Amino acid sequence: MMPTSGTPATHADRPPGAGDGDAHVDAGIAAPQARADEKRTATHCPYCSLQCGMALVQVPGEPLSVAARDFPTNRGAMCRKGWSAASLLSRRDRLTTPLLRDRRGEDLRPASWDEALDRVADELRSCQSHYGRDAAGVFGGGGLTNEKAYMLGKFARVALRTSSIDYNGRFCMSSAATAAQRAFGLDRGMPFPVQDIAATDAILLVGSNLAETMPPAVAYLDDQRLNGGRLVVIDPRATLTARRATLHLQNMPGTDLALANGLLHIAIKDGLVDEEFVRQRTSGFSFVEQRSARTGRTASSGSRGSRSRTCAAPRICWATRRRRWC
């Protein structure tokens, strides 16, 4: 029997699929034993935007290593990329000095940091003097800490005096950001702490495979199901995330819009729309009602099973490559 909300969950209560991500989320398998001569520095994983907490361990005469850190987001667990992050620093083929070309087409040669930085500064000045300040661009990434992102912005606007600054999300998430701006009035992101997931009655994941793309976050999905919540996954693939779902809607590729219209048609027809919320927070809903009435009827006949008592509140919807909310 599924535990109800507030009932302590045990391993025996695990629903089908819950907890089978243990092979993908390693809870401290690479953490070395604490030693008297070691120094630990609290930091964050340098990879994805989940920013899992981790500790870097320095032991005299040994390579830098990673240890678990008590941090609310990942609770000491990380994916294998996080645990192996420090191993890159001791690779034999890692560059340890700048390399320069004296002329285009010539081989790279080792150079000092002073020479390399002087070359960068000279080329930036030359470029901006010929083509304007905005000819020099700065490109960041989602793996930067808040402090690094702040300093990068300062460097671009104060030192280079350029407005050409962007980050990798423009390329991999621009369509999702545009859709979120038009639908919700904000860019991507999750406007609630991940701890809220465990207390949610119903979660809808659309095209998201967190078990493989963001493994530490899956622990919260397990907590949610152990607390009696329901997880619905919409994905053409039978992913690791879909296996742990209460209901997996395995739609055909290219039918996302039809399925969304079908679900919206059911919500409107069955009186599941929060009219007050729609009136205060949205615009153009009457047009959406008309369109869903025309296009959603056929899809809704195959979508009604997804209702499956997942209409309880509070609820969370995630979509697109990483995550979306509603």
Image (cartoon, rainbow, N blue to C red):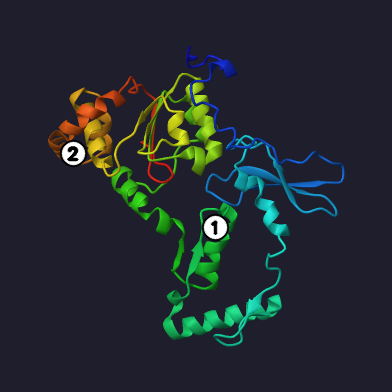
Cα–Cα span, label 1 and label 2: 39 Å
Against 306, is 2 above or below? Answer: above
Looking at the picture, tell me which residue is in the foreground, 326 or 8.
8
Secondary structure of the residue carrying numbered label 2: helix
* The quadrant where residue 117 appears: bottom right
**Left or right: 237 as drawn, with respect to 23:** left
Rate crowding at label 1 as few (under 14), some (14 to 19) or many (20 or more) other CA atoms within 10 Å. some
**Would you place residue 154 above or below residue 262 in this image?**
below
Q: Position of residue 13 (x, y in %)?
A: 54, 16
Disc number for residue 149? 1
Q: Position of residue 229 (x, y in %)?
A: 44, 22
Amino acid at circle 1? Ala
Q: Is residue 215 above or below residue 220?
A: below
Between tags 1 and 2, which lies in front?
A: 2
Residue with the mark numbered 2: 288
First in residue order: circle 1 vs circle 2: 1
The residue located at (62%, 34%) in the rendering is 75
Residue 189 is tagged as: none
Report the front residue among 131 and 32: 32
